[in-house]
Image (spheres, helix red, strand yellow):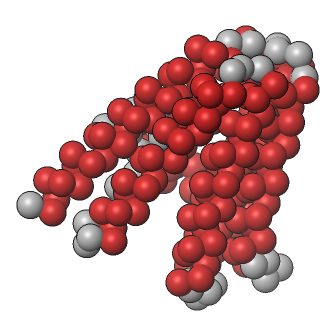
Amino acid sequence: MNGLYALKPWYASRLSGVRAALVRREVSPDTLTAAGVVSAAGAAAAVAWLPAGPLAALPVAALLAARLAFANLDGALARDTGRTTRRGAVLNELGDRAADLVVLAGFVALAPLWLVAVAALAATLPSWVSLAGTAAGAPRRNGGPVGKTERCLLVVIAAATGWAVPVLVVIAVGSALTAVVRFGWIWRKLA
């Protein structure tokens, strides 16, 4: 069950021209990681400050699309330019987790703090499970019922509708389920 993650190869091919331009301009992959966090912060601000509806949904969608593009491009750029490093891998993972948390922080103005905190913790669980599996020698597992891409889509839905609380519940439960699905897959791989 890969969810929207199954679209990653298609999305990466759409970004190939951008990636080539970034290679020519010698842009650092770390810069793209930071840009992803900044895009997430912009989306969070739009969720928090703009009234629900198209006025909020459009910038949130654009900023989260940029966040996903930067998340795709940073590693691809590092591989294309031979600049993959262990430090870059750590920075990439920390940037992705920071972006996840920053986006959900935008809900603090719209929902109970405890629910935002639970959703934020749950949103990081699938990645921690995947990283633990990789540390144990399993292949990296991505995707699932509510992975990064699905969470971004859910945030756009909340911005469009104002359904902050239901969306946070879906993010929390779906992310926990995604962590369980990934854990089961990793557990079988390591058997």
Residue depicted at 81% across the width and 25% down the height: 109
For the point 55% across and 75% down, the residue is 89
Q: Residue furthest left?
A: 191
Q: Is residue 24 visible?
A: no
As displayed, is residue 145 above or below residue 34?
Answer: above
Q: Hey, which residue is sitting farthest front in the picture?
A: 114
Q: Quadrant of the C terminus?
A: bottom left
Residue 154 on image: x %, y %:
61, 26
Q: Is residue 126 left or right of residue 72?
A: left
Q: Could you say which quadrant of the image residue 22 lies in?
A: bottom right
Give left or right: position of 64 versus 71.
right
> How many numbered markers are drawn?
0
Residue 113 point in image, percent of width and height: 69, 28
**Residue 160: x and y, percent?**
75, 16
Rendered view: 191 above or below 155: below
Name the residue rendered at 60%, 54% in the picture: 97
Between residue 2 and residue 40, name the one nearer to us. Answer: 40
Q: Is residue 169 left or right of residue 130?
A: right
Q: Nearer the viewer, residue 109 or 92?
A: 109
- Residue 189 visible somewhere in the drawing: yes
**Residue displayed at 80% across by 38% down:** 43
Q: Quadrant of the N terminus?
A: top left
